[in-house]
Amino acid sequence: MPLSLTRYYLLDVFTAKPFTGNQLAVFLDADGIEAEQMQAIANELNLAETVFVGKASSERHFPVRIFTPYRELPFAGHPTVGTAHLLAAHGLISKDNISAETPLVLEMGAGPVEITFEGELARFKVTRPAEIAASSLGQASAAEVAGLELSDIHADPVLASCGLPFHLVPLASVDALERLNLDPEAWGTHITPSGVAQAYFFVDQGHTIEARMFSFESGNFIEDPATGSAAAALAGYLGNALKEPSAKSKRYKHSRADRNEWRITQGEAMGRISEIRARASLDDAEDVVVEIAGEAVLMGEGGLYPRYS
């Protein structure tokens, strides 16, 4: 008799075109799988992230755990978008019953994340306001890490987080973005001591942004084709101009202080171009609220034999 399988689904996220965007695996019936086993499965599948969804804790509320091949994440953007699309595709939620008043809620390590749908977009509101701090990088050290000229670095980098921290490195041109040639020794000197192993290089072109995200895992650089958590951190940082539209940041001069929506493209250098929609707005308390939205394509499914003991 054939063994039963623990089934998972494969999606391309932050894209409407197959074989682009960021790959994701999602297990929809993860109850009974221990954290150690989840980590081993994520390493076996070797995708950017693997999601494990438990049974709904209440209507439209699902517990979720997210793993890279190396570690668990408290929050990540493309798993949020991809999981929302998959739950709708399998009829575990109805888009018609999802609204701002009755959102889909994914219960993550960083807290509950509320999701709504706008046509083909799944949109989530980041639960934490962006935390902005000084980066361990200056312009000169950023150029050294990036393998670029000092003139290619537009301004001093900052550290920003909406649940997962990133060094945000503004570049002067798309050409500089394409010429990135990261230096592992410089990374170890200037970034590793900060305890934040992710850097988001971006070129701000107004309402459009081109970006690349790199992390350093097990001695190797890993580029990500779409990083919703980094886009959220960047939108939160740029959105701070809404609070003080007349202020000039000493670290980064905004060309238009009233803008609050961006289309962020990422992954082109990898042949997996993606598009992330980011929005920043002010709530009644004058706090910056960040939203991320994107599409997803269901690509296939597979199964693992349940040899977890």
Image: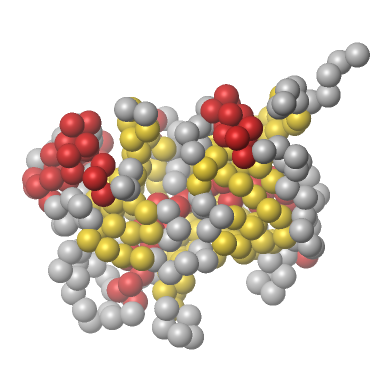
Q: Residue at x 43, y 38 (%)?
A: 225
Residue 67 is left or right of residue 189, and the answer is: right
Q: Residue at x 36, y 69 (%)?
A: 239
Q: Split into 4 quadrants, where in the image is the N terminus? A: top right
x, y percent for residue 206: 30, 61
Residue closer to the observer: 129 or 189: 189
Task: List the single residue furthest toward the bottom.
Answer: 284
Residue closer to the observer: 70 or 20: 70
Q: Tell me: residue 101, above or below residue 176.
A: below
Does residue 82 show up?
A: no
Q: Split into 4 quadrants, where in the image is the C terminus? A: top right
Q: Tell me: residue 216, above or below residue 280.
A: above
Residue 263, picture quadrant: bottom left
x, y percent for residue 64: 64, 50
Q: Tell me: residue 46, above or below residue 291.
A: above
Residue 99 is left or right of residue 109, and the answer is: right
Q: Residue at x 15, y 69 (%)?
A: 250
Task: List the single residue furthest toward the right.
Answer: 1
Q: Residue at x 51, y 64 (%)?
A: 126
Residue 234 is left or right of residue 23, and the answer is: left
Task: List the single residue furthest toward the front.
Answer: 309
x, y percent for residue 84: 66, 51
Colour pattern: secondary structure
Does residue 233 show up?
A: yes
x, y percent for residue 174: 24, 44
Residue 112, picture quadrant: bottom right
Residue closer to the observer: 258 or 28: 28
Residue 131, picture quadrant: bottom left
Residue 242 is left or right of residue 141, and the answer is: right
